[in-house]
Image (cartoon, helix red, strand yellow):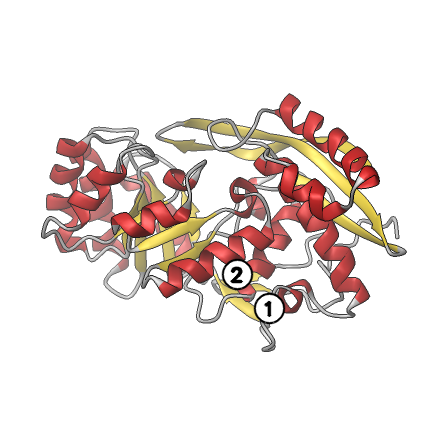
Amino acid sequence: MDIEPYHLDLARPLSTARGSIDEREGFLVRVEYADRVGLGEAAPLPGWTESLDACREALEWAPKLATDEDWGVALSETSAPAARHALALALADARAKLDNTPLYRYLGNERLVRRVPVNATVGDADAETTARSVIEAVENGFDCVKIKIGAREVDEDVERLRRVREVVGDDVALRADANGAWDREQAERAFDGLEALDLEYVEQPMPAEKVAAHAGLRNGGNEVPIALDESLAGRPVTDLLAAEAADYLVLKPMALGGPDRARNVARQARQAGVTPVISTTIDAVVARTAAVHVAAAIPEIPACGLATADWLADDLGPDPAPVADGQIEVPQAKGLGVDLGDE
């Protein structure tokens, strides 16, 4: 197993209610398994996963355990989500290559899936700038756009979204992501103002730990669907489903600990009548492409947060999953389909 650190700058800062993201650091992992080399990526994100140092420690420890036991034991004993993601992905990539099948089929979807719908993401800005950014996304073929909110006063964010709806009309699906910025009173006030705007959902309106508050908001008579994202970090999905706290779950394979776990959580959500959406943590090409395969492994998936390549100023290698007209291409090569030129 080989571990290679990387550092990538964003092409532009992504402004959220939790602060601005302007770089991504992580590790590219190569695992040799049955004469195949599998690629994995660990991109820790503070507040979501372990720290960068803890990730490295977990990655260095795992192959020692695999040598003494096996990779199954190593995966089960790796509690750091980003590190486990890299290991699980690398092994899945190698095994899918052995099976001569694309990763999404190895993950359980026997159908041919060529493309997956995706949303554009627009960061925080004033109302007119936000509207222009959404118009640009629509002109580039997106019919679903997610807008970051929560960094401003509630009334100002409601006005931003109202302005966007005015300029794009009713045919564009709009999502809003508050990143847990509001308390219950603010969330209720926001939902009162947003109810007429026909949003597809508001993502994480309140802090991650406020599961009961989200359930109360969702079941309190408002017509705005709720998606939970941060609430999944470090919490069994069964708790959220039992609480009936969400209409959608936004699943990040990096934060959940691997493509296998993301697929399993998506299946659990569907069985409970909750819609899964797959997203990235602004990852490099290896993890980003893996998330595309996860989305392709889930039948009838709605638009996913996978169109994030252009947020990076540079990448680890060529992108095998380009975005066009609001859809992302699913690689059909064996395994992950990412070629870094070293095989």
Please state the horizontal and vertical placement of residue 249, each as a whole percent of the image. Answer: 38, 52
Q: Which disc, if any, is residue 53?
A: none
Where is residue 229, by image quadrant?
top left
> Which residue is more in the foreground, 218 or 261?
261
Residue in the image at 60% along x and 68% along y: 108
For the residues carrying marks 2 and 1, which lies nearer the camera in this image?
Answer: 1
Q: Quadrant of the N terminus?
A: top right
Earlier residue among tags 2 and 1: 1
Q: Is residue 140 visible to us here? A: no
Tag 1 secondary structure: loop
111 vs 145, left or right, is right
Q: CA distance from mark 2 to mark 1?
A: 11 Å
Q: Is residue 260 visible to us here? A: yes
Residue that mark 1 sits on: 108
Q: Looking at the image, which residue sits at the far bottom?
A: 111
Residue that mark 2 sits on: 295
In the figure, 274 relative to 214: above or below? below
Please state the horizontal and vertical placement of residue 174, each as a whole percent of the image. Answer: 30, 54
The disc labelled 2 sits on which kind of residue?
Ala
Residue in the image at 46% along x and 28% along y: 47
The disc labelled 1 sits on which kind of residue?
Gly
Tag 2 secondary structure: helix
